[in-house]
Amino acid sequence: MLEVSPINLSRWARLKSPWILHFNSGACNACDIEVVSLLTPRYDVERFGVLLKGTPRHADVLVATGPVTRQAALRLKRIYELMPEPKFVIAVGTCASSGAPFKKCYNVLGGIDKVIPVDVYVPGCPPKPEAILYGFTKLLDKIKEETE
Amino acid sequence: MKVTTPEEEVIATMKAAVGDYILESKIPRPRRVYIRIKSNANKRAVSALLKAFPHAIISTITGVDIGEDIEINYHFWCGKAEVTIRTEVPKSNPEIETITDILPGAALYEREVHDLLGVKFTNHPNLTRLILPESWPKESYPLRKDWNPKHVGDLNGSLEETLIVGGIETERNGGPLVNVVVGPQHPALHEPERFLFKLDGEIVVDVEPRLGYAHRGIEKAAEQLMFFQDVHLVERVCGICNVAHTTCFCQAAEALGHIEVPPRALYLRTIVHELNRIHSHLLLLGIAGLEIGFESLFQYIWRDREIVLDLTEKLTGNRVMAEYSTIGGVRKDLTPALGNEIKRGLLKVKDRLNFYREVFQSDPTIELRTKDVGILSKEKALKLCVVGPVARGSGVKSDVRKHDPYAAYEDAPFQEILYKDGDSWARLMVRLDEVNESIDIILWAIDNIPGGPYRTRVPRRMPEGEALSRVEAPRGELVHYVRGNGTAYPERVKIRSPTLANIISFREMIRGCYVADIPAVLVSLDPCFSCTDRMVFVDEKSGRRWVWSMKDLRDRRRIGK
């Protein structure tokens, strides 16, 4: 039996429709095209209720790629702040997880979690779409656990 | 009769024009010419070159810190050879005359050298920050050898986002011109870039792009890694055209180290390079469908693109990052069974292409959204020095594979696709037809691949010297300039990606178009900002400039002005 509090209810609702927003914080595009691949017939991420949205106001999950350049950092933070609660972040790619191989570059902060909290890390350079799908299921598991 | 090569002809022409100023000239390998001139003669030499070769385009300007001096290299493709005109300026007072007034295409490259190495180009119309964040400390130049990253400190909190609104005109036809910001996060953009559009109602009057959100500092990082490590770093300049970057870098390193690549490796590189081109072009055609509101076309094309990605994975081990070329050859061999599988897969794609060609030629949605939209005339294309499918869509011959052949392209049978229309539709059709040509090249290469080894062992140390390598990336001419200093680490790696050359033309295309056409025209350029953003482009403007901070903009919105 669900404990019916507003936050739990909205978390529970996210389980069937985690709408996503994609932001590239200075990635090389490889992760980004793999994220877009998810929407195409072979991987078809829509079966999990995932829809790609255009604005942070409509999104529940921020799919962020890239090692976070100095110029993109502030914008990444702003986008995260614009999203309504409850909100979740998936860091896609090794750059987004740790900054490598750009970790020591002078214009790079090195990872999404340097700026905003991250729920799921998907390593790989770039991760295969299957891996990103697995990341989504992990996130759904996490939301489910928190709801119960 | 004395037989002279085209390279010698170039030097003879230059000596006849500005012989007094030439200190040294050499031809290290075919189609590469280096001319060293006196430091006050750069403008004279460039105008002499442009006079002798009116269709010469500037590839890039490379600045190199050589201790007491900063060396400035102007790279031109003059139709016969890549000519490098070089000169030095003292580091204590790095000043040199601009060449922007005789060649407008050089403006961005000069600003990049100014930003990263601190060279002042006198009389440059707008020598401001190009690549680094606005809050970057002054007198801090990352590509100088004595630069220390500690000088930068923590910019994180001090980063001020600014909008630059240029131009005197604020009214037209009795109504005010409206500024609209698009990006860096926007549904029509898949990469973080910001554009400021100036609108008269629904009509775009002007645009100022602000790039730089993906600037990571790869050129500096490349100097701190060994050559064989850099192969993997330059692969990550761009995830879409990664094969072009590695091939280009490996070619430069091989030329530097006088390494003979086995012929089989050259054919294998050609195969993977073309697989990469097919995947990139199909990706773009699909995205074009998405941007013009034809989503089923996007789904169809991306489904067929998976065939190519599967074949790439089977041959190289990775779907996207091929990691295939290496210095001295390639990493994996092609088995006959896999060769047959690639052929079968590509014939399937070829079959589907006929369907897509029919769609692009006859579908009314595509016709309405792309025909006669975003026109770039041949004259403008030549003047703006655009490259790749953008140039070929306007009827300018620019295929590096044809005119400066590398790998196995000297023997490969293929056509250079040219369209005369110069609109968005022509640029998309160039790519569609190039996929067909690429498939033919791969089928030919698999049938004619020579035997033998596919890589040679190479030393980690590279001799002192320099090499410039050009390849035809999916988006156009890609230039890597590599200099060695006798160790395993490169002295300088310079990368000029095709989108930087092409983004100049976006302003030309979009003026007079409707707001709704912005994504469709932008996508026909196939911009790839992760490549470009080792640098930034802010358009040249005359007239007044003022700056709004993000805070000003928010206040303004609240008041409802």
Image (cartoon, grey):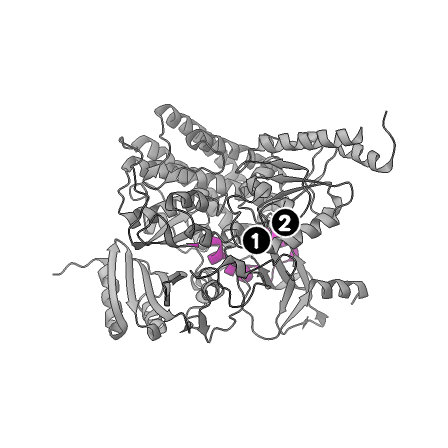
Which residue is located at x 60 percent, y 58 percent? B154
Q: Secondary structure at mark 2?
A: loop
Question: Seen in the image, is B156 located left or right of residue A6?
Answer: left
Residues at marks 2 and 1 touching, judged by CB atoms closer than 8 Å: yes
Instruction: Give the amino acid type for the residue marked by disc 1 in the picture.
Output: Leu
- Residue located beneath label 1 in the image: B522
Question: Seen in the image, is B519 located left or right of residue B426?
Answer: right
Which residue is located at x 63 percent, y 47 percent? A114
> Where residue A82 sits: x, y (%)?
74, 50
For the C terminus of chain B, the image quarter is: bottom right
User: Could one spot residue B362 in this view of the protein?
Assistant: yes
For the N terminus of chain B, the image quarter is: bottom left
Instruction: Give the amino acid type for the residue marked by disc 2 in the picture.
Output: Ala
Q: What secondary structure prevails in the magenta region?
A: helix
* Front residue (pair B399, A19): A19
Query: Label 1: how many residues lie within 10 Å, few (<14), some (14-19) or many (20+)?
Result: many
Whether A143 is drawn above or below B14: the answer is above
Label for residue B188? 2
In the image as oriented, which residue stretches furthest toward the right? A4
Q: Residue B513 in magenta?
A: yes
Q: What are the residue bounds of the magenta stretch? A: B495-522
In the image as oriented, which residue stretches furthest toward the left? B1
